[in-house]
């Protein structure tokens, strides 16, 4: 049983315990354990096989550690089977539907006898759910929408495809008269690597005009529903987008609710119920008076709760709520912090633009330095640089640096890590470069042991500065390599190597939970674009989104520093320079 399966069981146990009215601290412990296990860079099975103590993990006590070990060793958990058998059948399936919390699921099962998603859909269409005490038509309609979304789960598309499509939609609507707010919410706003349905939120003086324009956009393939303040459409790529328009003064509450995540909102509601406050998409209600407060901005919403504003990217119930309550959240890295790019290609290998063109584009992007890291020749990539051409490129870079102002070009290479861990250029060549980026492009199916030893050998090389796209994944196309990332992170910290956050939308590598762990272990990271043409510099926003999801401050990112500081860091790891 893998980490995702174990985390899912602990999350279900937390929900079931909440239904039964168990101790809230116990419920919270299971939720926290689920979060920790889901984000681990190593499988629990691997840790146990190595004799490691699961209690060393944050938030994992003796009882939960024992249950995790039982799941790993037997694939079953007696406590979960007993708990599941004590409640109506079908609760687990109902809890998979966004918008259905433990108490609502229990009422649907116990009062209406619903034990599956299909039964719930029939009950909604028959009006039974709307008539259920305190639910009503609005909740029933929302549940129906969520069921339809759930059935399209396999249609989740990469962030890199969804974001430009949504931005085109928003750009056509924002110039309309009276539009004040118009943004995407949900997983897109949180910069999840894949997204399902899109929730768009807005306010305008003439909301019906915005709705009419929305359903008439060229990108709209089909209109599922339309009202005066809400519409649902199918966009290109089969992506469903819902637009909701509300009053200006209620926008903050709506945006917070639909940005999520689900677990963040659940934890936030539970925390404030104890204070007599009920949180919803409409605002905050004082339970003692019934008075509803609305909020124009999310900042006002969180401030009313006595909390620091929580950036969308970290709203995953991973400790951000507790830190925000004490105003101790970190200042996350932003685009304006990035001062250079350390992984870029030109037409000397497989890029499309000249040194001059890439330098000018980087300068226009506001960068102070740019590392030219074309591919080495061992891969057989067209134009890959062998020793003689690399030396010629170095000379060309030195000459260009004498001519261009406002940006400094660094000499570099993206060198291939061969199957045995050796690099495909000799050390005496690498020693003359400013930046050496090492990466794996071949023999991707090696066993975890061989792959780990291969990468560790490369990291031991004193000339290697950066490990690029460390897991080699291509989202939706190629699985990550099998590698012990905990060992890689430890070695990177030991040898002062930098791990890359690759901004290419089909890579996003490292991913968010691995970034979080690497940062915890003291590994320095670099957000690079891997640009092959000038327009690729815009992709840095994807890498920044991943870094923010990994809770990175500017100090965690090497290329927030000046060029002299960057080169000094590399020299500390390589005394031969």
Image (spheres, rainbow, N blue to C red):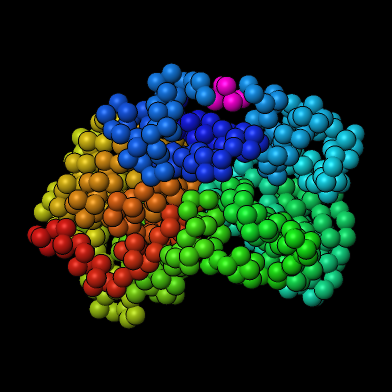
Is-magenta flag for residue 563?
A: no
Indicate left or right for 399 with 111 as reference.
Answer: left
Residue 252 sits in which quadrant?
bottom right
Of 541 and 150, which appears nearest the observer? 150
The residue that appears at 83% across and 46% down in the rendered structure is 134
In this picture, which residue range is highlighted in magenta?
80-84
Quadrant (top left, top right, bottom left, bottom right) of the N terminus: top left
The residue that appears at 44% across and 50% down in the rendered structure is 512
Indicate left or right for 496 with 253 as reference.
Answer: left
Question: Residue 447 placed where, x, y %?
Answer: 30, 28
Indicate left or right for 415 with 43 as reference.
Answer: left
Question: Residue 292 placed where, x, y %?
Answer: 77, 64
Indicate left or right for 232 with 267 as reference.
Answer: right
Of 148 and 537, which appears nearest the observer? 148
The residue that appears at 68% across and 30% down in the rendered structure is 91
Of 344 and 38, which appears nearest the observer? 38
Question: Residue 111 placed where, x, y %?
Answer: 81, 31
Q: Is residue 395 visible?
A: no
Quadrant (top left, top right, bottom left, bottom right) of the C terminus: bottom left
Question: Residue 110 placed where, x, y %?
Answer: 77, 29
The residue that appears at 32% across and 40% down in the rendered structure is 56
């Amino acid at each position: 049983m893998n980490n995702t399966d174990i985390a899912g069981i602990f999350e279900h146990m937390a929900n079931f315990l909440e239904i039964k009215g168990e101790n809230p601290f116990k419920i919270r412990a299971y939720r926290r354990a689920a979060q920790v296990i889901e984000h681990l860079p190593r499988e629990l099975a691997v840790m146990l096989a190595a004799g490691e103590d699961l209690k060393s993990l944050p938030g994992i006590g003796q009882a939960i550690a024992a249950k995790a070990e039982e799941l790993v060793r037997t694939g079953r958990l007696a406590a979960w089977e007993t708990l599941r058998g004590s409640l109506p059948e079908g609760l687990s399936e109902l809890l998979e539907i966004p918008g259905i919390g433990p108490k609502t699921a229990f009422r649907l099962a116990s009062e209406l006898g619903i034990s599956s998603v299909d039964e719930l859909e029939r009950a909604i269409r028959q009006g039974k759910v709307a008539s259920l005490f305190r639910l009503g038509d609005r909740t029933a309609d929302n549940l129906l929408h969520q069921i339809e979304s759930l059935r399209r789960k396999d249609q989740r598309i990469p962030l890199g495809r969804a974001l430009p499509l949504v931005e085109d939609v928003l750009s056509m609507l924002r110039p309309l008269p009276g539009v004040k707010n118009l943004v995407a919410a949900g997983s897109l706003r949180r910069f999840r690597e894949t997204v399902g349905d899109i929730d768009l939120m807005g306010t305008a003086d003439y909301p019906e005009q915005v709705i009419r324009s929305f359903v008439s956009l060229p990108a709209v393939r089909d209109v599922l529903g339309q009202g005066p303040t809400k519409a649902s459409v199918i966009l290109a790529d089969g992506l469903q987008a819902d637009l909701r328009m509300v009053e200006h003064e209620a926008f903050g509450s709506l945006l917070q609710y639909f940005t999520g995540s689900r677990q963040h909102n659940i934890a936030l509601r539970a925390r404030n119920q104890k204070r007599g406050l009920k949180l919803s998409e409409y605002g905050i209600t004082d339970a003692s008076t019934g008075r509803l407060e609305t909020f124009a901005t999310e900042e006002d919403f969180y401030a009313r709760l006595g909390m620091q504003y929580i950036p969308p990217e970290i709203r995953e119930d991973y400790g951000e709520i507790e830190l925000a309550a004490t105003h101790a959240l970190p200042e996350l890295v932003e685009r304006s912090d990035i001062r250079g790019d350390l992984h870029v290609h030109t037409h000397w290998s497989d890029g499309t633009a000249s040194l001059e063109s890439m330098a000018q584009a980087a300068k226009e992007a506001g960068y102070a330095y740019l590392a030219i890291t074309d591919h080495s020749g061992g891969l057989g990539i067209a134009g890959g640089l062998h020793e003689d051409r690399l030396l010629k490129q170095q000379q060309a870079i030195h000459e260009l640096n004498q001519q261009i102002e406002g940006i400094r070009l660094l000499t570099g290479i993206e060198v291939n890590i061969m199957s045995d861990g050796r690099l495909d250029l000799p050390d005496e060549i690498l020693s003359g470069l400013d930046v050496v980026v090492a990466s794996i492009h071949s023999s991707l199916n090696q066993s975890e042991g061989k792959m780990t030893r291969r990468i560790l050998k490369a990291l031991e090389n004193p000339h290697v500065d950066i490990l690029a796209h460390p897991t080699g994944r291509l989202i939706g196309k190629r699985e990550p390599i099998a590698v012990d990332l905990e060992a890689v992170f430890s070695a990177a910290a030991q040898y002062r190597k930098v791990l890359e956050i690759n901004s290419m939308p089909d890579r996003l590598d490292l991913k968010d939970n691995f970034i979080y762990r690497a940062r915890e272990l003291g590994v320095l990271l670099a957000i690079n674009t891997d640009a092959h043409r000038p327009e690729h510099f815009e992709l840095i926003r994807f890498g920044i989104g991943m870094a923010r999801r990994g809770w990175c401050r500017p100090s965690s990112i090497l290329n927030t520093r000046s060029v002299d500081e960057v080169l000094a860091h590399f020299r500390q790891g390589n005394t031969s320079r």
